[in-house]
Amino acid sequence: MQTMAPPDDTLTERFARLDERFDRTDERILEVDRRIAEGLESTNRRIAEGSEWTNRRITEGREETTIRFDRVEGDIRELKKSVASIQESVVAIHATLTRISVGLALTFASVILTKAY
């Protein structure tokens, strides 16, 4: 038994519909590619903006930290000077009290010795 092939018009029509489907698929693929490219550009732009903002904040923080450390170091130097001056005052007071103690001891000793004789 001999099979009959579909007429040429039917084949041509089927291939035309397949071509249309491929064309629509190609259009969809191009649209997806375009949207991906737009998303990539937007993402890259946002990442660049975020990086700039982050770098600016780091720089500002570093500058502020440097200023604060300089201020703290200045305060420490002033405190060291103050402590040194207080230590000198304490040494001077100690020397004065020692001299007064020795003077009082000698005075008491001379008073006791002069009253005893």
Image: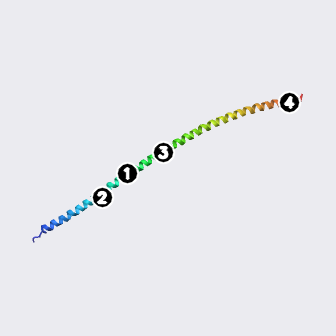
- Give yes or no for contact between labels 4 and 2 (Cβ–Cβ under 8 Å): no
Q: Earlier in the sequence, mark 4 or mark 2?
A: 2
Whole-angstrom CA distance, mark 2 to mark 1, is 20 Å
Q: Can you tell which of label 3 and label 4 is closer to the viewer?
A: 3
Secondary structure of residue under mark 3: helix
Q: Is residue 83 left or right of residue 107?
A: left
Q: Residues within 10 Å of mark 3 (few under 14, many from 20)?
A: few
Whole-angstrom CA distance, mark 2 to mark 3, is 41 Å
Q: Amino acid at mark 4?
A: Val
Q: Where residue 88 sits: x, y (%)?
A: 67, 33
Q: In the rendered view of the protein, which quadrant contains the C terminus?
A: top right
What label does residue 79 carry, if any? none
- Give yes or no for contact between labels 2 and 1 (Cβ–Cβ under 8 Å): no
Query: Which residue carries the number 2 mark?
Result: 32
Q: Residues within 10 Å of mark 2 (few under 14, many from 20)?
A: few
Q: Earlier in the sequence, mark 4 or mark 1?
A: 1
Q: Amino acid at mark 2?
A: Val
Please report the residue visible at 23 percent of the width from the left and 61 percent of the height from the top.
23
Q: Can you tell which of label 4 and label 2 is closer to the viewer?
A: 2
Query: Which residue carries the number 1 mark?
Result: 45
Q: Earlier in the sequence, mark 3 or mark 1?
A: 1
Query: Which residue carries the number 4 mark?
Result: 111
Whole-angstrom CA distance, mark 3 to mark 4, is 75 Å
Q: Earlier in the sequence, mark 2 or mark 3?
A: 2
